Image: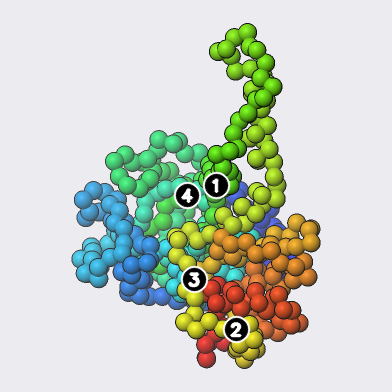
């Protein structure tokens, strides 16, 4: 993508990344002209009743305590007994269940795909909210139905500025520095650490496009677990040149050097770090995996169907990324699995990772490559890519 390609609301991607990304909030009025919610409040409630869907209800009032949190899945009767106001339903990973949201995610291709987390959809009647709070990730808040008043504060927030004794980290003291009312199609970007407070002014639906921000602790422990899993009990600290010590209670410079060398040697393999990170960052956050087709296909059968349908779709149950480090091979990562491939396939593999819908024409002559055809067939038989059914092209 070039720097001249327009961003949501006609903004420039390079300018947005330089001026706002992880730096300061941005309001974009009419970012998505004509945008309407692809799901009704009743349909969202239906999703929240399904076993595999992660959902929550936040009750500001009328619960066992202020800001009471309930976790789904919910019985249908629960929605019949909710109060008329002051509550919010939140449903995670709606991009998995609503194909219409794939187009919305494509709007954010100016940010690396591995950073995208999911689209959360929330519904709230009048006065519904989840309280003033801080998130530690980037988020684009898109209004899909009704109006929501957003207040934010760019002032520093003390760690102890939370209401004690409740399940949610809601700020005890919130003093807004800016305030806006968002209508359908409007969008508010918030970087990590900016306090915000959204309140529904009427029946309201908001689409939150969130981005992954692994903690340093998660990265280090994840990689160290990877290293440890490849070791065995025969690999131990050893010191065959141990000298006689004046003080047996001392940890000498020689011992410390050996320990440092063990740790540094384990951490110094850049290729091992890269390969681990590719697998780690494409793993499913929820543990849900793609569903393979009922009838697997041979490579020839798959290619025939691809040419007949004219397109393929990536499953929203799988994350795709690739690494090109200049070596003879590139590595494709799908759903936590690494697949080394010929460098000649860099262009079609990049297209596969960049786009959620790809036409056969865009793949062009790469479909004649035996390795690439086998790759696509394997991905299809694993459920990671799909072929549109009749009428879906």
Query: Which SS class for mark 2?
Result: loop
- The residue that disc 1 covers is 229
Q: Position of residue 383 (x, y in %)?
A: 52, 74
Q: Position of residue 129 (x, y in %)?
A: 36, 56
Query: Which SS class for mark 4?
Result: loop
- Work out how far the residue at label 1 is from the one at label 2, CA to CA, in angstroms: 35 Å
Identified at 55% across, 13% down, the residue is 249
**Residue 33 seen in this snapshot:** no
Q: Nearer the viewer, mark 3 or mark 4?
A: 3
Quadrant (top left/top right/bottom left/bottom right) for the N terminus: bottom right
- Work out how far the residue at label 1 is from the one at label 4, CA to CA, in angstroms: 33 Å
- The residue that disc 4 covers is 135
Q: Position of residue 166 (x, y in %)?
A: 30, 45
- Work out how far the residue at label 4 is from the one at label 2, CA to CA, in angstroms: 46 Å
Image: 99 above or below 318: below
* Mark 1 nearby-residue class (10 Å; few <14, some 14–19, many ≥20): few
Query: Which SS class for mark 1?
Result: helix
**Residue 99 seen in this snapshot:** yes
Identified at 23% across, 62% down, the residue is 83
């Amino acid at each position: 993508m070039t720097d001249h390609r327009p961003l949501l609301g006609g903004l420039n991607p390079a300018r947005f990344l330089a001026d706002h990304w992880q730096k300061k909030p941005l309001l974009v009025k009419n970012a998505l002209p004509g945008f309407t919610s692809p799901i009704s409040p009743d349909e969202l409630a239906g999703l929240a009743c399904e076993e595999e869907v992660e959902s929550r209800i936040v009750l500001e009032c009328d619960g066992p305590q202020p800001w009471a949190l309930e976790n789904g899945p919910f019985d249908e009767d629960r929605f019949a007994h909710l109060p008329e106001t002051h509550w919010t339903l939140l449903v995670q990973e709606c991009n998995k269940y609503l194909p219409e949201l794939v187009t919305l995610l494509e709007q954010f291709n100016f940010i690396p795909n591995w950073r995208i987390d999911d689209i959360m959809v929330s519904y709230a009647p009048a006065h519904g909210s989840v309280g003033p709070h801080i998130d530690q990730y980037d988020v684009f808040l898109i209004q899909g139905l009704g109006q929501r008043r957003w207040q934010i504060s760019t002032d520093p927030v003390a760690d102890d500025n939370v209401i004690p004794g409740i399940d949610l980290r809601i700020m005890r003291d919130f003093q807004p520095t800016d305030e806006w009312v968002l209508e359908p199609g409007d969008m508010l970007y918030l970087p990590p650490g900016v306090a915000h407070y959204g309140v529904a002014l009427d029946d309201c639906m908001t689409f939150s496009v969130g981005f992954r921000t692994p903690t340093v602790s998660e990265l280090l422990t994840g990689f160290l677990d990877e290293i440890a899993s490849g070791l065995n009990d025969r690999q131990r600290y050893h010191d065959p040149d141990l000298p006689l010590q004046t003080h047996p209670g001392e940890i000498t410079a020689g011992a410390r050097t050996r320990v440092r060398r063990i740790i540094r040697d384990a951490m110094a393999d850049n290729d091992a770090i890269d390969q681990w990170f590719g697998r780690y960052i494409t793993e499913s956050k929820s543990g849900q995996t793609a569903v393979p087709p009922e009838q697997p296909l041979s490579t020839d059968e798959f290619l025939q169907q691809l040419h007949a349908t004219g397109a393929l779709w990536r499953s929203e149950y799988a994350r795709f990324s690739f690494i090109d480090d200049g070596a003879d091979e590139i590595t494709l990562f799908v759903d936590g699995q690494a697949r080394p491939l010929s460098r000649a396939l860099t262009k079609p593999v990049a297209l596969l990772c960049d786009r959620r819908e790809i036409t056969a024409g865009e793949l062009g002559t790469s479909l004649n490559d035996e390795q690439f055809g086998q790759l696509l067939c394997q991905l299809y038989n694993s459920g990671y890519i799909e072929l549109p059914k009749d009428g879906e092209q």
